């Protein structure tokens, strides 16, 4: 993935990197982002300003609670249909993660299911905090 120095995170087969705010108005918090999902036999990538800092803020909140309590759900719901993440923590700390990603919602749909471990959450939280420290939400999620 280009620019490995850009803040980002990995969970399961998903890697997300943020390259800064892409909107021009002071109230916009659209981030130029690159997401890549890899699984045996498939790789799907998207790049552009389809992600809002407020959406990442919601994911950070949900993941922090999941990490602390070892239960619950976390999700990323983007206004744009480019990326969606749903995570559910099982009774033993195991986490089921579904990623839906598409570079073109009118012609494609890609779904990936991953089993991740609670130990994967801490590094993802660090990455999310780095993104949001640089590009904080300026509009409600």
Image (cartoon, rainbow, N blue to C red):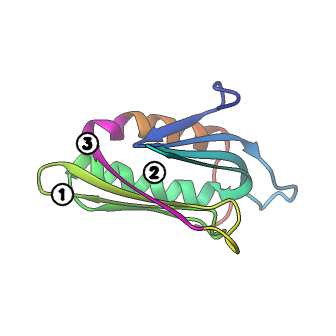
Task: Describe the element under mark 1 as helix, strand or loop.
Answer: loop
Mark 2 neighbour class, 10 Å CA radius: few under 14, some 14 to 19, many 20 or more: many
Q: Nearer the viewer, residue 49 or 103?
A: 103
Task: Describe the element under mark 3 as helix, strand or loop.
Answer: helix
- Residue 140: image x %, image y %? 61, 67
Residue picked out by circle 1: 90
Cβ atoms at labels 2 and 1 below 8 Å apart? no
Residue 6, compared with residue 90, is above or below; it is above
Mark 1 neighbour class, 10 Å CA radius: few under 14, some 14 to 19, many 20 or more: some
Q: Which mark is residue 118?
A: 3
Q: State the residue at coordinates (12%, 50%).
A: 92
Mark 3 neighbour class, 10 Å CA radius: few under 14, some 14 to 19, many 20 or more: some
Q: Nearer the viewer, residue 91 or 30?
A: 91
Residue picked out by circle 2: 60
Q: CA distance from mark 1 to mark 3?
A: 10 Å
Nearer the viewer's eye, disc 2 or disc 3? 3
Residue 75, compared with residue 93, is above or below; it is below
Q: Which range of residues does the magenta coloring cover?
A: 109-122
Q: Nearer the viewer, residue 78 or 102?
A: 102
- Residue 27: image x %, image y %? 78, 62
Q: Is residue 51 left or right of residue 48?
A: left
- Residue 15: image x %, image y %? 53, 41
Residue 84, compared with residue 10, is above or below; it is below
Q: In which quarter of the view is residue 106 placed?
A: bottom right
Toward the right, the furthest residue is 24
Nearer the viewer's eye, disc 2 or disc 1? 1
Q: Locate the N terminus by quadrant.
A: top right
């Amino acid at each position: 993935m280009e620019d490995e120095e850009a803040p980002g995170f990995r969970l399961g087969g998903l890697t997300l990197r943020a390259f800064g705010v892409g909107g021009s108005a002071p109230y916009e918090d659209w981030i130029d982002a690159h997401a890549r999902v890899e699984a045996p036999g498939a790789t799907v990538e998207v790049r552009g300003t389809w992600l809002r800092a407020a959406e990442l803020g919601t994911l950070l909140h949900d993941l922090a609670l999941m990490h602390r309590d070892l239960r619950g759900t976390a999700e990323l719901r983007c206004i744009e249909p480019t990326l969606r993440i749903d995570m559910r923590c099982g009774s033993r700390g195991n986490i089921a993660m579904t990623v839906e990603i598409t570079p073109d919602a009118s012609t494609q749909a890609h779904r990936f299911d991953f089993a991740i471990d609670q130990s994967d959450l801490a590094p993802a939280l660090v990455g999310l905090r780095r993104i949001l420290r640089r590009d904080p939400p300026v509009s409600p999620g």
